[in-house]
Amino acid sequence: MSTRALEITDLTYQYPNGTLALDKLSLAVEANERVAIIGANGAGKSTLLLHLTGVLRASSSSAFKVFGTELSKKTLREIRQRVGMVFQNPDDQLFCPSVHEDVAFGPRNLKLPESEVLKKVEESLAAVGLPDHGSRSAFQLSLGQKKRAAIATVLAMDCQMLALDEPTSALDPRGRREIMELLEQLGGTQLIITHDFALAQRLCSRAIILHNGRKVADGDPANLLNDEALLDAHDLL
Amino acid sequence: MKDTLFDQQASPDNFIHSLDPRTKILTLFPLIFVSTSTPPQFLLSFGLYSLYLIVLTALARIPIKLLIKRFLMALPFILMVSAYLPFVEQQDLSNPYSGGWWLFWNMVIKAFIGIYAMSVLTATTRFAKLIQGFARLRAPQLLLMLLSFTYRYMFVLVEEAQRMKRARDARAYGGRWLWQAKVIGQMIGTLFLRSYERGERVYLAMCSRGYDGTQSLWQNSSEALGRRDYAFALSSISVFILARWGVVI
C-alpha cells in the first residue's frame, strides 16, 4: 500500500472562545492527487490549514498524518519541509528585501551549500515564470507576480506536497489563468483551499466540501459543484 | 508606490554603483568618524570632505534633487538640536573657537557630512545588497532582520494607512481638528493591531519554511573583494587622513 499524502482522522478543534471550528473531521489525500477544499467562510478551512503548519495541535484522540508521519512537536520540522504552505496574502510570505532572498530563505534554512541555494532559486523562479525578477523587491511586483513568487519560495524547498490558501483570490483574469496553468504544470500532491469553482473543476480530481467543521461531501468536482441543492444547503450558493 | 527612496537610483553599470557594498560601507562610515572627530575650526578639512562627496556624487550620477530631498528630511532634526545654540552658549575666553556660533557650525557641518555620506551609500546600493554587505561584515543579525523587515513592510503599512484614510474620507470625514482626535486614535490603533497580526502571519510563513531562529538569513560565504574595491577604499581613506591630519591651519 502506498503512503497517503495526508490522512486526518477525527480532527476536532474548539477555539478558546467556544467556537467549534472542526468537528470530527476525517479526510485523506492520496499522493499525486490534486484536491480542492471548498467551504463557506467559517467552515473550518483556515483552521485545517493552521493544523497543517503546526500552529494548532490536534488533540490526542485524533490522528494527523503527513506521508505516514504523525504530526507532533518532534516531527514538525520534517513535516514543514514536506508540506509547502502558500499563504493567501503573498505580502506575508515575501518578507525579504528582494525576491531572490525570499526564495533563498527556505533552502538556507535547510542548510544547503550556497551554490545549491543559488541553483534552487534560479530553478524555482524559472518554474513560476519570473526568471528575471530575483533582484526586485516584492512591492515592485503585481499581485499575480507576488502570488507566483510566493509559490517559488516553497518550490525551492523540494516539498512533497503543496498546500495553497486561495491561490486565485483577488486576481485579475489573466493572473488567475496564469496561476491555474502553473499549478497544472507543477503537478504533484496539491491541497487547494479555494472558492474558485472553475479552478476546482479544471484542476482537481476531487473536491471536499466543508461545512461547520465537518466534511459534507467528497467526490468529483464536476458533480459536486453542479449540484445546486448541495451547494445551497452549505452556504455556497 | 513602485519606486522607492532606496532603489530608484541603483544601476549596475556605474563604477560607484558596482562596487561591493562592503567597500562602500567601509569607506563612508570611516568618513563620518573622521569628520566627527575634526575640530570645528578646520574649515579646509570640511571643505575637502565635502569635495570628496561631491566627486562621488558626480561619478555615481546621483541626481541633486534626490540629495536635496534627503537633506530636507533631516533638516528639522538638525535644527531642533542646534538652532538655539548661538543664543545660549557663551564663549569661553581661553578658546577662540568656542561659543554658540562655533558650536552651531560644528553640529551643522558634521550632520551635513554624515547625511551626505549616507545618501551616497544608499543611492548607489540596493537595499538588499546593503543588508547583505552588513551581514558579511558580521553586523548583528537581529538588527539586520529588524532593518530588513522595516524596509519590506514600511510601504505595505503606508498603503494600508492610505486605504484607511481613503475609506474614512469617503464617509465624509474632513479636517484634522482636535475633536476628531478620537477617530485618528482609532485608526492608529487599528493599524497597530493589523501590523501585529501581520507579524504573526509573517512569523508563521518563516516557520513553515524551516526557520527556527538559529539560522543566518543571509549568505555567509564571502566573495573576496576585487582589486577595484581595494583601490577605491585605500585611496578614499588616504584622502580622509590627508584632509584630517595633513591640513595645517
Image: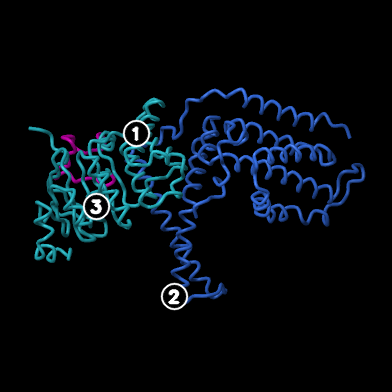
Identify the chain of the residue marked 1, using the numbered disc in the image. Answer: A
Instruction: Name the front one of labels 1 and 3.
Output: 1
* Residue at the spot of label 2: B171
* CB within 8 Å, label 3 to label 2: no
The chain drawn blue is chain what?
Answer: B
The residue that disc 3 covers is: A47
Residue placed furthest toward the left: A1
Label 1 secondary element: helix
Q: Which label number is shown at residue A123?
A: 1
Q: Is residue A164 above or below residue B42?
A: below
Q: Residue at x 66, y 35 (%)?
A: B28
* Image coordinates for residue B209, horizontal then vertical, percent: 33, 38
Q: Residue B232's mark?
A: none
| Image location (x, y in percent) of residue A10 | 12, 48
Q: CA distance from mark 1 to mark 2?
A: 48 Å
Which is in the foreground here, disc 1 or disc 2? Answer: 1
Labels 1 and 2 touching (C-beta < 8 A): no
Q: Is residue A46 above or below residue B14?
A: below
Kind of residue indicated by mark 3: Thr
**Residue type, mark 1 in image:** Glu
* Helix, strand or loop under label 2: loop
Magenta-tinted stretch: A55-75
Q: Nearer the viewer, residue B191 or A89?
A: A89
* Residue A72 covered by magenta stretch: yes
User: How many residues crowd mark 3 within 10 Å: few (<14), some (14–19), many (20+)?
Assistant: some
- Residue plotted at (27% across, 43% down): A54
